[in-house]
Image: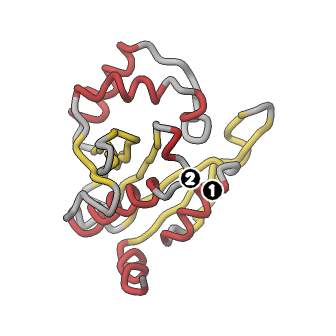
Amino acid sequence: MLFESARVTLRKMTKDDTELYHRWRNDVKVMHSTSPSLDVYPLKATEDFVEYVILKSDTSKGYIMVDKKSETSIGIVSLINLDYKNQNAECIIDIGEKEYWGKGYGAEGMKLLLDYAFYELNLHRVSLRVFSFNERAIHLYKKMGFELEGKSRQMLFRDGKWHDIIHMGILQEEYFMKKETE
C-alpha cells in the first residue's frame, strides 16, 4: 500500500491536526534539530500556517505519520516547494512524539514520502536541508541515498555556536537503483 509500511501509515494532514502540530511546533526539543527560527508561535500563527501553507497550497503536501499499533499520531512528513514543471520538491520530517525518536520511524516515514514523490508524482529530484550537528539524520539520509550537494556555512546559531546547514538531494533514478539493491 502506498502510504503504509510495517509500523507507520501516512494520512493527509487536516485542520483537525492543528492543535497537535501546534504542540510539536512549540516544543523546543522537537524543533531544536529542524526549525531555524526556534520560536514560540501563537495558536493563530499555527492555524494560518496549516491552512495556507499546508492545506491550501498547490506547492506543498503534508502527511501525519501514525503508529499503526497504537494509532498515535507521531510526526509529520511534507513535500514543500513542489515545482511540477521541473519535477522537484524539498522534503521535511519532524517526529513530534519524543518517545518515537531513534527507533526507525523517521526512516519509514521518509521512505513512504519518497515512494510517493518518485513513483506517484514522478518527481525527478527531492532535496532537503539538515543542520550540521544533526549527525543521526545525516547518517539516515546518506543511507537512504541522498547525496551531499553543498552547505550554507555558519547559517544557524544554536546552543551558543554557529552551525552549517547541509543541502542534500536524491534523484529519481538513484532512488530506484537503491531500492533494487535492497
Residue 62, visible in the rendered structure: no
In the drawing, does residue 133 fall left or right of residue 121?
right
Residue depicted at 45% across the width and 60% down the height: 107
The amino acid at mark 1 is Arg
Mark 1 falls on what kind of element? helix
Mark 2 falls on what kind of element? loop
Camera-side residue of 41 and 22:
22
Q: In this view, does 5 lie above or below 48?
A: below
Residue depicted at 34% across the width and 22% down the height: 19
Ranked by sequence position, the earlier of labels 1 and 2 is: 2
Q: What is the spatial separation of the Cα atoms under label 1 and label 2, in whole angstroms?
A: 9 Å
The residue wearing badge 2 is 102
Within 10 Å of disc 2 (Cα), the crowding (few <14, some 14-19, many 20+) is few
The residue wearing badge 1 is 136
The quarter of the displayed image where residue 157 is located: top right
In the drawing, does residue 150 fall left or right of residue 3?
right
Instruction: Name the spot of residue 26 as percent of width and height, x first.
Output: 50, 23
Residue depicted at 42% across the width and 82% down the height: 182
Closer to the eye: label 1 or 2: 2
Instruction: Name the spot of residue 53 as percent of width and height, x first.
Output: 31, 32
Q: Residue furthest front?
A: 69
Q: In this view, does 165 lie above or below 96?
A: below
Q: Are marks 1 and 2 in contact (CB under 8 Å)?
A: yes
Camera-side residue of 84 and 156:
156
Q: Which residue lies furthest to the bottom in this view?
A: 181
Residue 8, visible in the rendered structure: yes
The amino acid at mark 2 is Gly
Quadrant location of the N terminus? bottom left
Camera-side residue of 171 and 26:
26
Instruction: Name the spot of residue 54 as percent of width and height, x first.
Output: 29, 35
In the drawing, does residue 178 fall left or right of residue 27?
left
